[in-house]
Amino acid sequence: MSKELVHTPEGVRDVYGRESYERSTVKHKIKEIMYRYGYENILTPTFEFFDVFAKEISQASARDLYKFFDNEGNTLVLRPDFTPSVARCIAKYFMEDTEPVRICYSGNIFINTHRLQGKLREHTQMGAELMCDGSVNADAEMIAMMIESIRATGLTDFKVTIGDADYFKGIIEEAGIDEDTEDQLREYLSGRNYSALEDYLHNLVKEGKIESKFADILIHMPDFTTADELEEGAADLVNSRSRSSIERLKNLYHLLDVYGASDNVSFDLAMLSEYNYYTGVMFRAYTYGVGDAIAKGGRYDNLLSKFGKDAPAIGYMVDLEYLMSALYNQKIDIPYSQEPEVVTYNDSNYEEKLAQVQRKRAQGYYIVLKHE
């Protein structure tokens, strides 16, 4: 039994030694960028009421939560995502505020799913949220800050793809697509299953449930990746929601160019999320050597109203597990403190050696005191 207890459960692990120090170094660099942009730290509970998250994620994702009960019979969950927790907190403590609120955080999230075979179920995330500002300027600030924070870790070879949830929603409304069909389309698009998407749409056209024009638009959503190509994505659409999303993305790209961040940017009009709270711009950062986004975020203008505060908001998070994997795989040097000096002592000179060591420690030296 004792040998079994030294092992961790599947999906979690110990972090110690140099790796632990390097993670702390990277976290410090990211937090420093957030502080420079005027963001203040916030701490939220590791577990919350189930209802804080339940309506904002898909049914499949809701099954992946770590659920348990308190003594009063309330259903609680380990947080799977920071954004709803931060939104609840902002609504509670900044209910009457109308000026922008800038918040940053770091901590662990928990996903209990068999689909993450070989992947961690506990991830450290760092992120920032900008509340009470619905402008494209806020979109640009958030994405530029995310890019700058990633660059600060030493990673330079990465790309941020940007989409807009309103583009897809506008197509759905204009095409008159029902909710069940929308959910199926969303599943194919978010899963990048474009072959199944095309077959599904062709069948809908044959059955007369969707015009071929809209099927073609949905099939070609992933094709428009540069700022110059964005207008082509709205060429055959008349709804204001989709066209406005294209104009906003073009304005966003201009502002990111002013920030000096446009070189890291491309577009993906097919970008969707399993989280239902995104209402506008969405973005994800990718690099080689990692199988998932190292950072992601988006606008969620309706989420705060769930907690009684009607205000727009946008945020992003950096996944430290994926970011560290990228840094290691790309052999990027992470500054490491000097190895501690070893000072030995014996029974007769312990106090003398201790006094010497304490003086040097006060001067900033790293020292281990060890018996001979």
Image (spheres, rainbow, N blue to C red):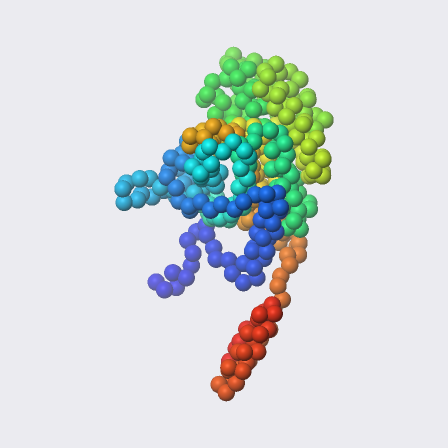
| Residue at (65% x, 49% y) in the render | 152
Is residue 255 left or right of 167 when viewed as pictured?
A: right
Q: Nearer the viewer, residue 220 or 150?
A: 150
Total residue callouts: 0
| Residue at (51% x, 61% y) in the render | 16
Residue 146 x %, y %: 61, 41
Q: Residue furthest bottom?
A: 348
Residue 122 x %, y %: 47, 48
Question: Which part of the image, by quadrant, shows the N terminus?
Answer: bottom left
- Asked whether the viewer can see residue 41, the reply is yes
Q: Residue furthest left?
A: 72
| Residue at (54% x, 58% y) in the render | 20
| Residue at (44% x, 45% y) in the render | 44
Determine the image quadrant of residue 134: top right
Q: Nearer the viewer, residue 191 or 318?
A: 318
The vertical placement of 324 against 368, above or below, is above
- Asked whether the viewer can see residue 225, the reply is no
Q: Nearer the viewer, residue 184 or 68?
A: 68
The vertical placement of 224 against 297, above or below, is above
Q: Residue furthest top?
A: 208
Q: Nearer the viewer, residue 47 or 174?
A: 47
Residue 273 x %, y %: 52, 32
Residue 370 x %, y %: 52, 77
Determine the image quadrant of residue 159: top right
